[in-house]
Image (cartoon, rainbow, N blue to C red):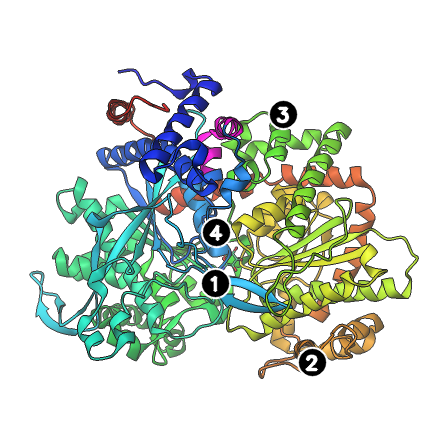
């Protein structure tokens, strides 16, 4: 049967069918006629209708990968930040025009409907968002793959700023049914914790352990389809499988309940409730380790189940399966895979080790020592007794081999050992067990090789590779900035959507005045959209939590300057804030001088237990209050802190931004990915030579990257090594800096005691050091002068709009390398050895036929 493709229908016809479908779902699910349905019901019915199309390709993709017995990569991540699905799915399905017509005909707006969709906060920041961008690219490139993770009931907390003070509220993303997920009871897995290991000898003579009296936890998966983009109707759909313990009544422990221990009775039911809310501090929490193992063990069992649907015995496992460990959180997978292979598949230890190494690889996302996970050995042994024994054996074998190679170098052993100081070092486990380890930007990988993993590099020089991050330009440009995307397509065609390297053709138009003007016009509209948001949903709250009127008076002519990301000292929101204070003082000193207007935007969450980060948020909110209410200063400068930053807010802020702040202390931001999103959307970057900023500058060219500043990573490392940096000297020698720092303590920026306490704490952190650390640990004052001067140059360029636009267009044109399509192709080639596996035509037709037979109303 020849497949009927939807291109045979006109947009009108497709819209008419879609309306029929929506009516069908409204009456059969909600008992509502179209006219009576409220926006939420309409939203759901629309999602169900769109899902039909996705299901067909989802099934055909799965059938194809199964039939071809293709090698497949499983992406293991404790975090995902997928963003809302409806809009992105419509973009990828190329259905947006049809849906717009449907909405027009039925008197609805996309804006109203999308408000009913929650933005799943299943990650902290860049690492989780990267995982989601990767799934988009894997799907678009038709690479056999699946993502595994956890379905946290509450996601990352919802941030509210009560008069500038962050409070955390549960994020209720599952308050209503989520139309994009599918519960798969048949795929549930049982995961074992605790118990007593019972030794026996395997058929191959290895010592293995069964588990007596385990604590059983049931994991139920929910699948979410990740829709790839394709010019034709053959888009692939990748599964994101998220495990939960919440939904299985089996996890409730009645005996404990009856004994009055309600907390213990519910411990396993609540295991997947909350995403561990900090991405920076190392706190040994039993629940977190249990979460990690739950995800790993359920997934490994599921991978083996999947493998045996196409393979008769375990012999091909090494050829068919690849597993990517996203940061150290899933690293216990190495022990669990070893256990499964040796215990259930009779594999000799040596062979199982060879298979494990061949299958797994690990990505490191940070060099901050507090983020390198370690677990207390006692806790580990108690929760995971068999996996602990396996790690002991892995470590013994490994340390012995190192001893043989480097006799009398006990120091080296201490550095590389997995078990050390009563801790289990997950990064070392991941490095030892993987065949490849990658960093996420060139500088980051260099630092990994030269310092963090130096001793491992001596042993395995070829194990370490770099794969620079990217972002999916489809969500972040095509979907988030439709007008800019249209402008680009008008100039260079649509080839860039599937091959982002073609974006370089835009450089031919950078000096063209008409294109520059069109670009500025698009930017202006995006700024207006952001201002509407700020005046509507983005208003600040008073101390009681009530939203008050927005005090932002700027219009779209102002320069929109954004720093949106997790709040962390190394990201240096404080540097930005101190420069704002300097500018504020300059305006007060010279109120009549003409200046470029600026709207400075901040957004981002601080880890719940990270006091200094919360204090920095407090400072910025104090500045916002002070400056925005000052009749003179507010003419030139406005400050906004948008609360509860997430993917959806990023999609509004980024396209509206002129200046992107990427100002981390050099050497500390592994890559950054926000930097790429901004640049793709035509913002210029003010940035240090850190993470992927460096490669972006190289790609865009120094001429079009005018705002780099600050110390280099080597200079920072040198100052640290020699302890030569003296924040005090800078403070003493530069009057404007001294005045800005002093204002943190002189009550001029604050209106009550709590604010004064917060700001004073920052004063002391800069000049004396806080919590026992050195003064100004992140070299804020060191880079302040250079930052200040560079910011002044930003104003000069902004005063020449066409020149600015030329530079912005050159920035977009230079971004070809920073699509996750490129990153994923590198992973496929250099780490996984995986190739595309497009949907098989015959299988596709089979699924389509089954669908067509089921309904008179086909969208195909
Ligand atoms: C973050 C880094 C970022 C990087 C993302 C994605 C963690 C642990 N690391 O610089 O801080 O862009 O990972 O690789 O969240």
The correct choice, above or below, for 175 with respect to 72 in the image is below
Toward which corner of the image does residue 307 lie, by quadrant? top left
Q: Residues within 10 Å of mark 1 (few under 14, many from 20)?
A: many
Residue 418 in the image: state x and y as whole percent.
Answer: 34, 71
**Marks 3 and 4: CB-CB under 8 Å?**
no
- Which is nearer the N-term, disc 3 or disc 1? 1
Q: Secondary structure at mark 2?
A: helix
Mark seen at residue 129:
4
Q: Nearer the viewer, mark 1 or mark 4?
A: 1
Q: Residues within 10 Å of mark 4 (few under 14, many from 20)?
A: many
Residue 103 belongs to magenta span: yes
Residue at image mark 3: 490
Q: Does residue 316 show up?
A: no
Q: Nearer the viewer, mark 2 or mark 3?
A: 2
Q: Which residues are magenta?
A: 88-105
Toward which corner of the image does residue 111 lie, by quadrant? top right
> Position of 232 compared to 736: left or right?
left
**Marks 3 and 1: CB-CB under 8 Å?**
no
Q: Secondary structure at mark 1?
A: loop
Q: Nearer the viewer, residue 338 or 529?
A: 529
Mark seen at residue 753:
2
Toward which corner of the image does residue 738 lie, by quadrant? bottom right
- Which is nearer the N-term, disc 1 or disc 2? 1
Q: Nearer the viewer, mark 3 or mark 1?
A: 1
Residue at image mark 1: 157
Mark seen at residue 661:
none
Q: Secondary structure at mark 4?
A: helix
Q: Does residue 759 show up?
A: yes
Residue 87 in the image: state x and y as whole percent.
Answer: 49, 38
Residue 420 belongs to magenta span: no
Q: CA distance from mark 3 to mark 1?
A: 41 Å
Q: CA distance from mark 3 to mark 4?
A: 29 Å
């Amino acid at each position: 049967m020849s497949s009927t493709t939807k291109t045979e229908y006109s947009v009108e016809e497709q819209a008419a069918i879609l309306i029929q479908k929506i009516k069908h779902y409204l009456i059969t699910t909600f008992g509502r006629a179209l006219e009576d349905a409220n926006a939420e019901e309409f939203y759901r019915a629309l999602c169900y209708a769109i899902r039909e199309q996705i299901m067909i390709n989802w099934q055909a993709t799965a059938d194809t990968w199964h039939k071809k017995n293709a090698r497949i990569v499983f992406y293991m991540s404790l975090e995902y930040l997928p963003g809302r699905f409806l809009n992105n799915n419509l973009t990828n399905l190329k259905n947006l025009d049809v849906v717009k017509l449907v909405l027009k005909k039925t008197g609805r707006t996309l804006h109203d409907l999308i408000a009913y969709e929650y933005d799943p906060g299943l990650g902290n920041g860049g690492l989780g968002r990267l995982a989601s961008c990767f799934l988009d690219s894997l799907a678009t490139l038709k690479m056999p793959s699946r993502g595994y993770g956890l379905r946290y009931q509450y996601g990352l907390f919802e941030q509210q700023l009560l008069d500038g003070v962050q409070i955390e509220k549960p994020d209720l993303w599952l308050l209503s049914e989520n139309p994009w997920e599918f519960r798969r009871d048949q795929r549930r897995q049982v995961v074992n914790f605790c118990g007593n290991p019972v030794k026996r000898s395997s058929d191959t003579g290895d010592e293995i352990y069964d588990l007596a009296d385990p604590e059983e936890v049931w994991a139920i998966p929910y699948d979410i389809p990740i829709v790839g983009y394709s010019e034709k109707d053959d888009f692939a759909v990748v599964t994101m499988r998220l495990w939960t313990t919440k939904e299985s009544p089996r996890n409730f422990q009645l005996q404990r309940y009856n004994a009055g221990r309600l907390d213990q009775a519910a411990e396993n039911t609540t295991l997947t409730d909350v995403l561990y809310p900090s991405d920076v501090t190392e706190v040994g929490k039993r629940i977190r380790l249990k979460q990690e193992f739950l995800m790993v063990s359920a997934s490994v069992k599921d991978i083996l189940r999947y493998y045996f649907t196409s393979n008769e015995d375990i012999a091909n496992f090494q050829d068919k399966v690849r597993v990517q460990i996203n940061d150290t959180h899933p690293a216990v997978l190495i022990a669990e895979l070893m256990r499964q292979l040796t215990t259930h598949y009779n594999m000799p230890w040596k062979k199982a080790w060879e298979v494990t190494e061949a299958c797994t690889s690990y990505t490191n996302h940070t060099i901050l020592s507090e983020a390198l996970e370690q677990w207390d050995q006692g806790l580990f042994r108690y929760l995971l007794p068999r996996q602990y024994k396996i790690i002991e054996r892995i470590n013994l074998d490994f340390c012995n081999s190192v001893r043989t190679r480097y006799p009398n170098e006990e120091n080296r052993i201490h550095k590389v050992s997995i078990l050390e100081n009563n801790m289990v070092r997950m990064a070392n486990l991941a490095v030892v067990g993987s065949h490849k380890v990658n960093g996420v930007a060139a500088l980051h990988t260099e630092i990994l090789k030269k310092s963090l993993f130096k001793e491992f590099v001596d042993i395995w020089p070829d194990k370490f590779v770099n794969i620079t991050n990217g972002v999916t330009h489809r969500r972040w440009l095509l979907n988030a900035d439709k007008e800019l995307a249209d402008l680009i397509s008008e100039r260079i065609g649509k080839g860039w959507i599937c091959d982002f390297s073609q974006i370089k053709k835009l450089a031919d138009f950078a000096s063209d005045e008409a294109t520059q003007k069109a670009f500025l016009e698009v930017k202006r509209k995006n700024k207006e959209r952001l201002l509407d948001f700020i005046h509507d949903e983005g208003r600040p709250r008073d101390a009681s939590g009530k939203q008050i009127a927005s005090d932002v008076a700027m219009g779209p002519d102002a320069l929109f300057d954004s720093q949106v990301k997790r709040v962390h000292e190394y990201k240096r929101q404080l540097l930005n804030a101190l420069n704002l204070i300097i500018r504020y003082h300059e305006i007060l000193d010279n109120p009549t001088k003409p200046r470029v207007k600026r709207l400075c935007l901040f957004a981002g969450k601080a880890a719940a237990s990270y006091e200094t980060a919360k204090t920095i948020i407090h400072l910025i909110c104090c500045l916002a209050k002070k400056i925005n209410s000052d009749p003179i200063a507010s003419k030139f400068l406005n400050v906004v802190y948008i609360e509860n930053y997430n993917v959806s807010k990023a999609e509004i802020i980024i396209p509206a931004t002129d200046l992107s702040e990427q100002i981390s202390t050099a050497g500390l931001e592994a890559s950054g990915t926000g930097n790429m999103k901004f640049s793709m959307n035509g913002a210029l970057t003010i940035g240090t030579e850190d993470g992927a900023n460096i490669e972006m500058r190289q790609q865009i060219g120094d001429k079009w990257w005018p705002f780099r500043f600050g110390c280099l990573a080597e200079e920072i490392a040198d100052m640290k090594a020699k302890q030569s940096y003296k924040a005090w000297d800078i403070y003493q020698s530069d009057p404007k800096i001294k005045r800005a720092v002093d204002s943190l303590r002189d009550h001029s920026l604050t209106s009550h005691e709590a604010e004064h306490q917060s700001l004073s704490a920052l004063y002391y952190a800069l000049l004396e050091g806080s919590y026992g650390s050195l003064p100004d640990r992140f070299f804020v004052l060191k880079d302040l002068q250079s930052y200040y001067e560079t910011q002044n140059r930003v104003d000069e360029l902004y005063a020449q709009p066409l020149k600015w636009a030329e530079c912005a267009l050159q920035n977009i044109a230079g971004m070809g390398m920073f699509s996750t399509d490129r990153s994923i192709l590198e992973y496929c080639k250099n780490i996984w050895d995986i190739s595309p596996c497009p949907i098989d035509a015959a299988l596709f037709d089979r699924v389509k036929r089954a669908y067509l037979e089921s309904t008179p109303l086909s969208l195909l």
